[in-house]
Image (cartoon, grey):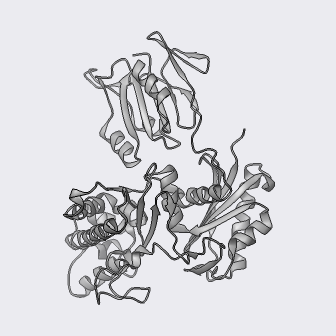
Amino acid sequence: MKDKLYIGIDVGGTKIAAALVKGSGEILSREKLPTPPNSRASKVLSVISALITELSVKNGIQLKNISGIGIGIPGIVDATTGKIKITVNVGLSGLNITSELAKKYHCVVAAGNDVNLGILGEKWLGAARGASNVVGLFPGTGIGGGIIANNALVTGAFGAAAELGHMIMQINGPACSCGNRGCLEALAGRWALERDIRKAVSQGENTIITQLTKNNLRTIKSKIIREALKKKDPLTVRLVTQMSQILGQACVNLRHIFDPEIILFGGGLIEACGKFILPRVKKTMQKDPFFKRVSHCDIVSSALGDNAVILGAVALVKEKAGDNSGCRVKSPVLNLDGCNAVTVNGKIYEQDMYIRANGKIKKRGGKLNTTAKKTRLFIEPKEIKKICRHNPEVLIIGTKNEQKLRLPQISLDFLKENCINLAILPLSKAVALYNRTGESKAILLNIEH
């Protein structure tokens, strides 16, 4: 039976992105258009309709063949009715978007807060895959949040749960955009960092950021902060370290409340500066004496980037439609034929080959590379990324020379960042593990060496 097709939509303040997605999570096509500025709901709906039409025409799909539409909204959405209660920078407040789209497209429609759906997407196919309890923090201009408890999104009585950026961290602290004082966002969001940089400059402190922004400190983009950290600008290093420690203390609080397996960080600031921020967040969180005796919690970064909300929206509408298909690809059964061949679905392979997590079988274009001394075999990072398309939970490598085969550190970092476990085994054990494991899996078989 063919995979069902869904459309996932991510409504943002500056752009609206949409994708045609298989029930397995494979993105077939992606489109985006600018969000109409200061517009009424009708104009936003017109852009959404234009994106849906573009996806269907571009891919030769009739709209009647779309099984469902999922949509992420930057605001508070009633999970039961689909009514949008509050939106920021998008004129959708008061609209029942699920009934509007269902009426037009005659399919199941589901809507939710965009950050919540980003966390759901990461749980389905990203860095939180396999975890039942996840807390998400997305430092961007402000700080978004999301919570999954016992495999379910926590949305609260009125759809307003998980506004983690507005938990109060400092009594009578700096004013926040929500009207309170001392919120996490007011202490550790990017706009708070911009405020503190401007204040320091006004008090006479020097920073390379004034040069990088050509003295325009009104908006300091994440890439500017990254560049300043790279150049070890003292002011930037001090303020971002302070921000990281505050985020770490927030993680201590969230851990005491929710006891998650994973605290997942995403958003533009993390994409740009995560390698500096996250180790400091983790160090601060690990100082908590209570949980040293209780459990382990991972701090991880988003693996799906701009696709997280879109895939989370698809996961939400699939759940609403009762569609459990595509959660696991039916993998082929492998048989080792002596030492020099592998049989897959009745076909014999006598050269190096790999199978992706979507079950697609590919022959390798050449042999494994060797180091200058030819004492080690290694796989190029770009090939590891190619093999690991479709988000496997485990990468199995079978080779006759498992003691010699090594992956470059950049490949190991890629696997770690994407929560992909690695097993390098003799051919026979690799084949046995592939046939046995129920995880989403990819395998590379080095038959020729």
At which x and y percent is residue 37? 61, 80
Is residue 163 or residue 436 the one in the foreground? 436
The picture quadrant where one finds residue 228 is bottom left
Is residue 366 or residue 400 the one in the foreground? 400
The picture quadrant where one finds residue 294 is bottom left
Residue 242 located left or right of residue 263? left
Using the image, determine if residue 268 lies above or below residue 397. Answer: below
Using the image, determine if residue 375 lies above or below residue 80. Answer: above
- The residue shown at (51%, 49%) is 125
Q: Quick one: which residue is furthest to the top in this view?
A: 338
Residue 400 visible at all: yes
Q: Quadrant of the N terminus?
A: top right
- The residue shown at (45%, 72%) is 162
- The residue shown at (63%, 67%) is 111
At which x and y percent is residue 178? 44, 86
At which x and y percent is residue 153? 51, 64
Q: Quadrant of the C terminus?
A: top left
The picture quadrant where one finds residue 175 is bottom left
Is residue 304 or residue 329 the one in the foreground? 329
Number of disc labels: 0
At which x and y percent is residue 135? 41, 63
Using the image, determine if residue 224 lies above or below residue 202. Answer: above
Is residue 160 or residue 186 the one in the foreground? 160
Residue 215 visible at all: no
